[in-house]
Image: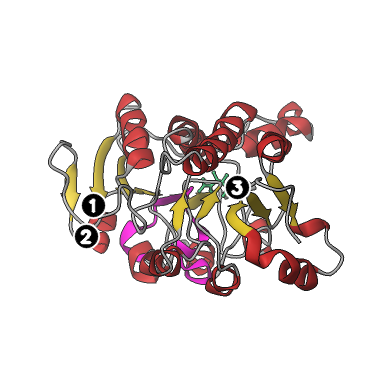
C-alpha cells in the first residue's frame, strides 16, 4: 500500500517536532510508524515504497535492509551514532545530520554548565529557596581562575567552546585523532597526558564505537582531585561507573553532565551527589535551534528528492560520491 500516485513515501519511526512532520506531509506521503497498532504489519505493507527515513531515533541495519527502495536517512541532531551509517553506505543509502545550526547553542550551554559546576549555581539557588541564606552565607565555591581546559574533540562545537574558554581567560589544550594546523591551542596526542596537564576536561567528541568509554578510570585519575569533567557529547564516551567511583572517592572534584549512558535513566549514585550538576540533555534544546535543526532535516529531504543531492551528508556517505 503506498501513498497517492507520484508522491514520494517517507517513514518517520517516532514523533519529531511537529513542524517537521507538518512541512513534509505537504509534499510527501509520510508514514507515521509510531501511530500503527501493529508496527511490523504496517512496515511490511509499506516497506517496498519507502524511499526516505526521517528520524530522531535509532536506525539499525535490520531496518535499512527491510526497505529495498530506501535512498536517504535524514537524521535529526549533529550526532548520528544511533544510525548505522556504515551499513547505509554499503547499501548506497545517504545519511544526513544537522551540523552547524546548533554549534553556538551547544557551546553556550557548555560554558553555562561549566560555570554552574565550578561556582555551584544550582546549589546556591537551592540554598536561597530553602531559606538557608537567612541563617548564614552560602559557602565559598571553587574558582575558574587559573584553570586550564582540555577539550576532547576539537570539531565545530569544540572550537566554539574553545573560543568561549579563551574569553573566560582559560588556557586551552585539545586532544583528538590529529593535530590541527589552523589552531594555536596545544595539542596532546595522548588523552591521559592532556588530563594530567589540565584541570577541566570538556568532552565534545562524537559518540559511537570508536569513542566508547574513552574517558576511563585512568583519565579521571590523571585529571586529579581539583578536576572537573564536563560532558555535552554522548554518555557513552565516559565510563559512567568509573566516573561515579571517581566522584565518590574524590579522585576528581566534580562533573557537569548533559548526557548519560542510558538516557533518560540517570544513575541514582549521581543524583545523590549534591555538588554535581546534571542536565536532561538540553545542549541544543531551544526553540530557535531545534527549529533550525528541523528545517535542515526538511531541506535535506527536499533537496534529495528534487535531484539536487543532500545538503549535509555525513562522512560515511559523502556527497558528491567519491
Ligand atoms: C539532539 C544532540 O537534538 O545534535 C545532537 O547530537 O545530541 C542533540 O542536539 C538530540 O540528539 C535530539 O534528541
Picture quadrant of residue 186: top left
Q: Earlier in the sequence, mark 3 or mark 1?
A: 1
For the record, the magenta segment spans 221-242
Q: Determine the residue located farthest toward the right in the rendered image.
A: 37
Quarter of the image where the N terminus is located: bottom right
**297 to 198, vertically: above or below:** above
Q: Is mark 2 within 8 Å of ligand 1?
A: no
Q: Secondary structure at mark 2?
A: helix
Instruction: Tell me which residue sits at (35%, 41%) in the image.
Output: 158
Q: Is residue 226 magenta?
A: yes
Q: Nearer the viewer, residue 164 or 115?
A: 164
According to the picture, the residue beneath numbered tag 3 turns out to be: 281
According to the picture, the residue beneath numbered tag 2 turns out to be: 193
Q: Is residue 84 visible?
A: yes
Q: Nearer the viewer, residue 181 or 119?
A: 181
Determine the CA span between mark 2 and mark 3.
29 Å
Residue 145 percent across, percent down from the top left: 35, 32
Determine the CA span between mark 2 and mark 1.
6 Å
Q: Is mark 3 within 8 Å of ligand 1?
A: yes
Q: Is residue 137 magenta?
A: no
According to the picture, the residue beneath numbered tag 1 turns out to be: 197
Q: Is residue 121 left or right of residue 81?
A: right
Residue 63 percent across, percent down from the top left: 60, 70
Q: Secondary structure at mark 1?
A: helix
Determine the CA span between mark 3 and mark 1.
28 Å
Q: Is residue 238 left or right of residue 43?
A: left
Amino acid at each position: 500500500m503506498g501513498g497517492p500516485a507520484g508522491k514520494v513515501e517517507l517513514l518517520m519511526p517516532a514523533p519529531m517536532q511537529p513542524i517537521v512532520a507538518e512541512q513534509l506531509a505537504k509534499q510527501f506521503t509520510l508514514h507515521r510508524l509510531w501511530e500503527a497498532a501493529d508496527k511490523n504489519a504496517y512496515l511490511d505493507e509499506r516497506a517496498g515504497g519507502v524511499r526516505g527515513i526521517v528520524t530522531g531515533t535509532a536506525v539499525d541495519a535490520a531496518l535499512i535492509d527491510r526497505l529495498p527502495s530506501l535512498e536517504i536517512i535524514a537524521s535529526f541532531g549533529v550526532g548520528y551514532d544511533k544510525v548505522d551509517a556504515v551499513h547505509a553506505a554499503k547499501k548506497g543509502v545517504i545519511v544526513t545530520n544537522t551540523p552547524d545550526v546548533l554549534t553556538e547553542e551547544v557551546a553556550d550551554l557548555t560554558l553555562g554548565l561549566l560555570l554552574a559546576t565550578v561556582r555551584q549555581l544550582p546549589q546556591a539557588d537551592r540554598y536561597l529557596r530553602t531559606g538557608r541564606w537567612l541563617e548564614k552565607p552560602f559557602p565559598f565555591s571553587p574558582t575558574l581562575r587559573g584553570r586550564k581546559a582540555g577539550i576532547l574533540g576539537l570539531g565545530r562545537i569544540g572550537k566554539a567552546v574553545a573560543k568561549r574558554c579563551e574569553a573566560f581567560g582559560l588556557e586551552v589544550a585539545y586532544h583528538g585523532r590529529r593535530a590541527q594546523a589552523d589552531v594555536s591551542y596545544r595539542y596532546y596526542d595522548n588523552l591521559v597526558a592532556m588530563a594530567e596537564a589540565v584541570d577541566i576536561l570538556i568532552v565534545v567528541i562524537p559518540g559511537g564505537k570508536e569513542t566508547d568509554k574513552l574517558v576511563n578510570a585512568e583519565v579521571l585519575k590523571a585529571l586529579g582531585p581539583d578536576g572537573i569533567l564536563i560532558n555535552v557529547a554522548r554518555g557513552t564516551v565516559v565510563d559512567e561507573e568509573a566516573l561515579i567511583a571517581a566522584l565518590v572517592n574524590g579522585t576528581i572534584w566534580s562533573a557537569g553532565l548533559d548526557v548519560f549512558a542510558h538516557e533518560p535513566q540517570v544513575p541514582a549514585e549521581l543524583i545523590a551527589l549534591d555538588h554535581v550538576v546534571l542536565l536532561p540533555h538540553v545542549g541544543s534544546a531551544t526553540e530557535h535551534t531545534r527549529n533550525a535543526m528541523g528545517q535542515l532535516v526538511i531541506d535535506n529531504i527536499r533537496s534529495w528528492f528534487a535531484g539536487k543531492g543532500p545538503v549535509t551528508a555525513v562522512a560515511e556517505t559523502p556527497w558528491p560520491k567519491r
